[in-house]
């Protein structure tokens, strides 16, 4: 098999821009593909928050013209090599010179998001022509990259540079579909003849993800269970019929983990490193975490960690209903790191004052603190209503921090249920999405800590032995790319 050339269009990528797991995937998958002998090129917006000096950005093309449906826009293109793969940035102050990536400080979506990320998609394709990069695959991530996937199929099939490319769309979260005003149809050049329920239209609005799903040569999401769930009315977010129509060309590929960043043996952000054969360092991280979060310093008390966006999907409102009862009824501690929903920020931000020594919280996001929580906690809870893949449970496994999760999506795929008879498994799963189920699953985990310590150690060793590196996932992506080219 000859090496593949892959263009990736994304709104996020570590280390440059991140709000969630999308960035982690787009930052790790190209490296894994390159290790397999393929060539990946990533195109991102040049947000105002990106540090040009830190990431060694240099100007490649200026002025750079992008023909939109009814006008030509002029921008500039910058490049960086610090991520280990070629990363290009589209500089266009009108669209990307804003504080937030997708919304303002009040979490209101920018009304021109369709134009912003449609422009990113078409600029990425034009960039390929400008630098002579003839991709085999145009890989769009979520609704922000959907226009690129559709355009390469609809408009560029005879193009000397882009004509051989197959379009692949990865859905990282079906709940976010890029649903905006239909006035963007002309600007994006989608054609009003395509603005109907089988292409770009949903309830009179433009649905970018839907159009990408229909147009792509192949579609995938980020775990096998989520692929099955999204074909049902409960989890399909209105797009289940279109995903079912994909038949065999809709896959679930579980995300991998960048163990260069997330492994306790080499994690430089920790108080002490450690491994499965010697857990002394984990105890030191727990002590440091208890001190940092003003918790009672006692290694015998099990500590449950939370690192999450405060969004309805994450189930933290359900945890909020029972967390006070949990710390009252059980000898257990919590640490919470996250931000998002203002009501949940107020709740979790204030709860440490009502339960001093038992619950510690920090509103916002701090990468070093998130690493310390993974290393210093004994359990990590993810009460998600749905979870396309989830990454924190994968980090937790490697750090010997047993996941407590609702069995949905990637959480179901990656956590092996504890068998109380044999001690086998890697964590604790519950199925009903309600606060009562959370309470009893936490109780089950806590009782295992106190009453079956040998089982806890066995679970911990099994968890740390799990391997969710990107190598296997990247090979599945290559297989998918080849199938897409076959179509």
Image: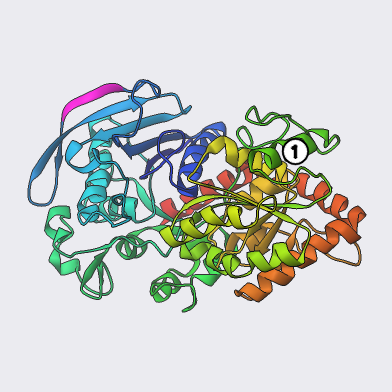
Above or below residue 17? Residue 213 is: below
* Above or below: residue 263 compared with residue 447: above
Camera sees residue 406:
no
Magenta span main SS: strand
Q: Residue at x 19, y 69 (%)?
A: 195
Q: Residue at x 23, y 48 (%)?
A: 116
Residue 22, x across and y down, in percent: 46, 48
* Quarter location, residue 44: top left
Is 146 positioned to the left or the right of 389 in the image? Answer: left
Query: x, y (%) of residue 487?
Result: 40, 57
The answer to which of 355 and 318 lies nearer the viewer is: 355
Q: Secondary structure at mark 1?
A: helix
Residue at the farthest left position: 71
Q: Is residue 383 left or right of residue 63?
A: right
Q: Can you give x and y, in whole percent of width and height, for residue 158 in the image?
A: 23, 47
User: Residue 365 at x, y = what percent?
Assistant: 49, 43
The residue range painted magenta reads: 58-63
* In this rendering, position of residue 194 left or right of residue 365: left
Judge the density around disc 1: few (<14), some (14-19), many (≥20) Cα neighbours within 10 Å: some
Task: Evaluate whether residue 127 shows in this view.
Answer: yes
Residue assigned mark 1? 287
> Which is more toward the observer, 477 or 346?
346
Q: Residue at x 28, y 27 (%)?
A: 78
Residue 61 lies in the magenta stretch: yes
Membership of 286 in magenta stretch: no
Task: Tell me if residue 74 comes above or below residue 452 in the rendering.
Answer: above
Quadrant in the picture for residue 400: top right
């Amino acid at each position: 098999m000859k090496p593949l050339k892959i263009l990736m269009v994304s709104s996020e990528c570590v280390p440059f821009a991140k709000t969630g797991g999308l960035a982690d995937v787009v930052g790790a998958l190209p490296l894994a593909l390159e290790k397999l002998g393929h060539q990946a090129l990533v195109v991102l917006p040049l947000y105002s928050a990106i540090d040009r000096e830190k990431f060694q950005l240099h100007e490649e093309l200026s002025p750079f013209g992008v023909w939109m449906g009814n006008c030509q826009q002029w921008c500039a293109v910058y490049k960086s090599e610090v991520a280990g793969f070629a990363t290009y940035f589209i500089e266009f102050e009108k669209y990307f010179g804003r504080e937030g990536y997708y919304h303002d400080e009040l979490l209101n979506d920018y009304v021109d998001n369709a134009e912003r990320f449609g422009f990113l998609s078409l600029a990425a394709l034009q960039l390929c022509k400008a630098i002579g990069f003839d991709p085999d695959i145009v890989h769009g991530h979520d609704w922000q990259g959907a226009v690129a996937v559709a355009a390469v199929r609809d408009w560029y099939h005879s193009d000397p540079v882009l004509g051989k490319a197959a379009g692949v769309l990865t859905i990282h979260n079906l709940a976010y579909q890029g649903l905006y005003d239909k006035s963007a149809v002309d600007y994006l050049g989608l054609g009003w003849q395509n603005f109907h329920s089988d292409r770009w239209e949903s309830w009179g609005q433009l649905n970018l993800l839907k159009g990408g799903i229909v147009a792509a040569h192949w579609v995938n999401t980020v775990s096998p269970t989520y692929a099955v769930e999204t074909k049902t009315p409960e989890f399909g977010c209105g797009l289940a019929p279109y995903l079912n129509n994909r038949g065999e060309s809709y896959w679930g590929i579980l995300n991998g983990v960048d163990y260069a960043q997330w492994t306790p043996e080499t994690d430089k952000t920790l108080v002490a490193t450690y491994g499965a054969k010697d857990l002394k360092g984990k105890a030191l991280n727990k002590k440091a975490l208890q001190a940092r979060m003003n918790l009672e310093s006692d290694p015998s008390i099990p500590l449950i960690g939370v690192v999450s966006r405060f969004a309805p999907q994450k189930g933290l409102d359900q945890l909020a209903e029972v967390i006070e009862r949990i710390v009252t009824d059980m000898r257990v501690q919590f640490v919470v790191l996250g931000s998002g929903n203002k009501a949940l920020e107020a709740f979790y931000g204030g709860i440490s004052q009502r339960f001093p020594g038992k619950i510690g919280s920090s509103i916002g996001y701090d990468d070093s603190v998130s690493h310390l929580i993974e290393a210093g906690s004994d359990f990590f809870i993810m009460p998600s209503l749905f979870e396309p893949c989830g990454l924190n449970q994968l980090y937790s496994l490697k750090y010997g921090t047993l996941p407590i999760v609702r069995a949905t999506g990637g959480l179901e795929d990656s956590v092996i249920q504890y068998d109380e008879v044999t001690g086998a498994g890697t964590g604790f799963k519950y199925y009903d999405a309600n606060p009562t189920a959370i309470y009893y699953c936490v109780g089950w985990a806590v009782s295992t800590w106190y009453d079956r310590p040998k089982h806890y150690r066995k679970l911990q060793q099994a968890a740390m032995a799990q391997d969710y590196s990107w190598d296997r996932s990247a090979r599945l992506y290559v297989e998918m790319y080849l199938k897409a080219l076959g179509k």
